[in-house]
Each structure stands twice: as structure tokens, then as C-alpha cells.
Image: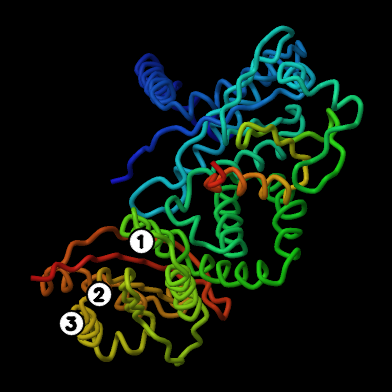
Amino acid sequence: MKNRQQKEIVRAIYYKDVGYVLESIGLLEALQRGQIRCGICGEQITVNNLRAIAKKSGEYLLCCEKELCIQKLASILRQVDTSA
Amino acid sequence: MMTLITVFEFIAQYRVWGLVVIGIGIICYLVRVLLDEDRSALWRARIYKAIYRVSGRTTAEKEYIANDIASRINLARRRMPFAKEYLPSSIGVQWIEGGKGEAVSLGNDEMLVRLDPGDLQEENIVLMANALVKRTSLAGIRHILNSPLELSMDMNLVKSLLTEIGDRRILDWYFRNEYQPTSDDSSEVKKWNEKITEIDERGLFTRLLLVELDNYSRQIIGKTSSPNMLDEITGLVEFLFRIATKAYGQDVPLDYMSRYIKIGVILVGETSKVLSDGLDRYLKAFAFAMRRQLASIYVFVTDKEWLGATNPEIYEQFVKITKNLDKDIEQHFQIRKEFELKYACTDSAGNKRKARISRYTPHYT
């Protein structure tokens, strides 16, 4: 007998809304000035290459669209925060 | 076209009653779709796609993207050959309302992903399949696994999920942009990926390895992780890899005993042995596994598919005898049969095989 498990909800940003979302969290200006870099590989983040936004220990982490960067970001989010 | 002709012929023959029967059939199908969340999402996706193509409306595109991802991944997940539970669990897409003046809240350790336009749906599906696998599978053991092994298992789970979707464009995109580059990125990932792939090709990844890892994660709840735990898991992978790559006549270990994993595998695959000696040797092997107090025993039956074409009588005989094995095991031993899964695979020599795997958990007094 197979069981249905709970649904996993993934929150997603529509590609046309990236600017609005960044504005809402106060990062749009910094991004437009070229000051935001991928938290994993260090590549400059633009509205077009942004793939994910995460929050770790109260800090925003932005990630570019490279697959390895997303994988590493997902791993970082899973790590237990022991700094507190 | 043939179906349509058949329907017209049916109506022409039975007239009103034919229409009534077809009408009932359509109503039954619609009720089935409505009751099934994933199937109704698939229809919603099709309708919104058509609306988006005609109108170019943003809301229609968003509905299309979200419903298409959820329905295709969830229906594929349901077809995946897991043993007792759906792993990974189902997925839903929730859009962040990003209009002007909308406040976006993001919790700690939470991630928002940007999805591409509906025309690039392959990328979106691969991205979400990755997210689903990473967030919901291998629960309770991810902190033990080393990165290359974890990555290899994830990659093969995503590959299985995307294969079940049945869209070659999605698989092509995944292999070209993610699977191959990730595998080639490090020799350690390549090494583990080759092992997991071999295990998967024999059908033992989702039907045995993940079952045992899920069982393992339940046993170690609340225990501090240690290097021994990683050794236990890598040992299990190596054990299954040796079985998966076993050559004809080669002896390989058929039980694996560590602190928390105690399993045995009984291989039933050699036609001549089964036909000449019957099932005694396998029942003896099962009794031996019971004496060793193994926590679970798998019976893995493979038959040569081509035998059915070359010698149907011998093939029928083989199938009949091996079917009796299950009855004999349940009759002779105090066990609980957890599942039996039938599937097709290729052996290490590339021969097509039909396979059947059953998991038994013994009761020891």
C-alpha cells in the first residue's frame, strides 16, 4: 500500500517579478550598482542570472543560475547553524 | 484516428445505447480527473497554456508554469518504483506576489527560486525536480553522507524522476546541462555515480538501497552521527554494486551485516540450476539467512527474457517454479512479506531481463 505524503511547497519568483522582489527586500539598488555577487561562486548577480534567494542566519544569500551553485546553496541551507 | 473510427462504428451499431455508454465513459473519466489532483492540474496546465498562447496574459503563463510543473513531476513520482512509500513527496509551486508595494517575507533557511518563462519549461521542471529530491529524499541521513555520494544519489533520483516524465527534451536538457557536468566535475562524484548507476540499472536503487537507507534513518534517529555511520552506508553501496556487476559464475557476498544494517540477498537467476535442482537450494539459503538473524531478506529473481522466444517451454517451467518459491518461503518461515515488485532491466552483460524483487522481514522469537 502506497502512502501519499504531505505536499512540499516551493516558493517561486516569476521571472518578470525579480525586480519587484529584490526591491521588496531592499537589494535592488545594490544589484543595479553591480554590488551583489553569487554567494557561492562570486559571479556578479544580475536580474537575468539570479536563480535563488535564500536567508541564512538572518542574512540574504543570492545565487546565480549555475547548477553547482544551487546545489551548494541547498547544502548550506540544510546545515545546522551552530554559531548561535 | 483508429479510435475515432471505432467510436463511430460503435455508435452506428448501437445507436442511442452506444451514445449512452460513451457518455457514461466520458463522465467516469472526468470524475476520475476531478478527483485526482495531479491529473486535474495537468488539464489546467493545458488550458492555461492555450489561453497564454492566445492572449499572452501573465496570469495564464504563471498558472501554466505552476500547474505543468506540479502535474508532470507528481504524476512521474507516482510511477516511480518505490517500495512502500512515495519518495520524494509531491510538489506544489507557490508564486511570490511580487507586484509593486508587495512585501516579501523570507524565513530563515528558506529559499525562493526564480522560474523561467513557460517556453523554457524544461529548465523549470529540472530545477523543481532537483529541489524536490534535495528537500524530501534521504531524510535523516543527509548529514552523514559525504558530498560526492549524496550528489550521486540525488542525481540518480532526479534522473529516475525525469525519466518517468517521459519527455526526452527534459532528459536531454538535464544530461547536457547538469548530470554530465556534475559527474565530470570531480573524480569522487564520478566514482560514486558509476556505482549508483550500475545499482540503478539492475533496479536495486529505488527498490533496495533507498528502502534500506530509509529504514536505517529510522534506526539512527536521535543518535550522534559518526564516521562509522558513513562507513555503514558506503559499505551497503559497495555490497550492492558487487551484486549489480556480478558476472556469470562469480561468487560475491550475499549478506551485509553492520551495526544497523543487516540484510541478505538471494539471487535466483540461473535457469539450469532452477530447472535441475528445484527450489531447495534457495530455501536452504533463506534458512541460512534466518539463522544469521538478518533484519530483512530480499529475493531477487531474474529470468532471461529471450528464453521465452527461443524455448517457451523451458521459460514457462522456470517462471512456474520461481513463482512457487514465494509460497514456499511464506509456508516454511516466520516472515512478513513487505512487497514484491516486477520490472524489466538489463544485466551487467547487457542482456534484457525480467526481474522480480521481494522483501521479507523475519520474525525472530
Residue A18 coordinates in the image, percent (x, y): 76, 23
> Is B320 located above or below residue B95 in the figure?
below
Residue B157 coordinates in the image, percent (x, y): 55, 54
Name which residue type carries label 3.
Answer: Arg
* Marked residue nearer the N-terminal end (1 or 2): 1
At horizontal 38% and vertical 80% (from top left) the residue drawn is B269
Q: Chain of mark 1?
A: B
Q: Which residue is mark 2?
A: B294
* Residue B168 appears in view: yes
At horizontal 59% and vertical 41% (from top left) the residue drawn is B131
> How many neighbours does mark 2 have within 10 angstroms: few (below 14), some (14-19), or many (20 or more)?
many
Name which residue type carries label 2.
Answer: Leu
> How many neighbours does mark 1 have within 10 angstroms: few (below 14), some (14-19), or many (20 or more)?
some
How far is mark 2 from mark 3, CA to CA?
Answer: 8 Å
Name which residue type carries label 1.
Answer: Tyr
Q: Which residue is mark 1?
A: B216
* Residue B133 appears in view: no
- Relative side of B219 to A41, left or right: left
Residue B257 coordinates in the image, percent (x, y): 33, 78
Judged from the image, the secondary structure of the residue bearing numbered disc 1 is helix
> Is B263 located above or below residue A80 in the figure?
below
Residue B291 is labelled as: 3
Quarter assignment of residue A59: top right
Q: Which quadrant would the N terminus of chain B be assigned to in this image?
A: top right
In the current view of this chain or complex, which residue is farthest to the top? Answer: B101
Q: Kindly indicate whether the residues beneath marks 3 and 1 are on one polypeptide chain.
A: yes
Q: Chain of mark 2?
A: B
Which callout, 3 or 1, points to the residue nearer the camera?
A: 1
> How many neighbours does mark 3 have within 10 angstroms: few (below 14), some (14-19), or many (20 or more)?
few
